[in-house]
Amino acid sequence: MGKSLKDRIGVDIGRRAKLEDGLKWAAENDIHYIDIQLDAGENAMETFDDARCETVKALCRENGIHLGLHTLSGVNMAEYSNFFRQAADDYIRAYIDMALRLDAEWIVVHAGFHFTADYEMRKQTGLERLQRASEYAEDKGVHLLLENMNREPEDAEVNYLGHTLEECVFYFDNLKSPNLHWTFTINHATLVPEGIDGFLDTFGIERMREVRVADNLGDKEHHMYPGEGSIDFRALFTRIEGMGYTGHYTNGFGTLEDMARGRDYLVAEAKAAGVPSAQ
């Protein structure tokens, strides 16, 4: 028998806590999947010496916690300018190296962003960088999860790449690495006409390794507590679980306590829909 739905719902700690504290909190709340960002503060990757890495690995091992890393979407993977393009390559390679040091099981990555007038150049640059990163990840045995991003307001000059269904098809059609997968952010999908079902119709679950959860109103990006927005979670779980998805979900809204509490709401919705894994 597989894991229950609740056991598969994790939490995005992000920058909300020091990693070791977050792991202890997760253990106390019977949470088995977390991801963390390593860009700044107490979790800046340069603060992880070998002893700290061993402590993290021991906490995960002793408490049955699966650890993932989450790169910062503000670091432009579509950067082409001199000096900065090399820094972007170094950034993603450093995350891959840290995944090895921490026994992290996945790294969430992004396609970058453009400034409207340089769309095609940025799009191609981001693709090429993700191809290089995928090759490096293959060599190191690390798995990357490309996230579908959010639409920005209509008059925004800066826009994420990989937010429309068409753009996501472009990246996944051209990135064939067995170490490059998909993290499906459902609240982002509500911001395009095809919606959640459109992404599932197009990609199915073959490359899906994570579902990131927050509610949304469909007008702009929100990370709302489930049930406060427009997403039908009963329909969501019926569809995804019915397709045979057995991977994890990651809550990404509010405080740590909100995300822990939200697990019960999500399981209740799935149970009300008759989803077997929630029973």
Image: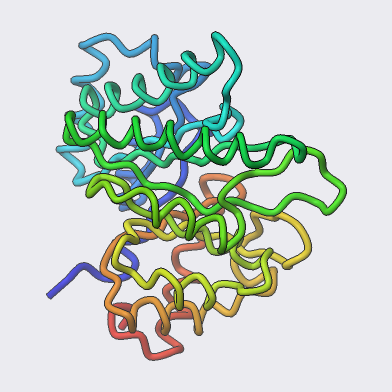
* Residue 89 position by quadrant: top left
- Looking at the image, the residue that sits furthest to the left is 1
* Residue 91 position by quadrant: top left
Residue drawn at x 38%, y 90% is 274
Image quadrant occupied by the N terminus:
bottom left
Give coordinates of residue 209: x percent, y percent: 32, 57
Give coordinates of residue 70: x percent, y percent: 44, 36
* Residue 78 position by quadrant: top right
Q: Is residue 185 left or right of residue 99?
A: right
Q: Is residue 24 left or right of residue 192?
A: left
Image quadrant occupied by the C terminus:
bottom left
Q: Is residue 155 left or right of residue 118?
A: right
Give coordinates of residue 65: x percent, y percent: 25, 44
Q: Is residue 43 above or below residue 262?
A: above
Give coordinates of residue 40: x percent, y percent: 52, 18
Q: Is residue 231 above or below residue 13?
A: below
- Residue closest to the eye, 155 or 2: 155
Q: Is residue 49 above or below residue 141?
A: above
Residue drawn at x 46%, y 59% is 184
Residue drawn at x 26%, y 42% is 143
Residue drawn at x 35%, y 38% is 107
- Residue closest to the eye, 260 or 51: 51
- Number of callouts: 0
- Residue closest to the eye, 233 or 245: 245
Q: Is residue 171 left or right of residue 23?
A: right
Way the structure is coloured: rainbow
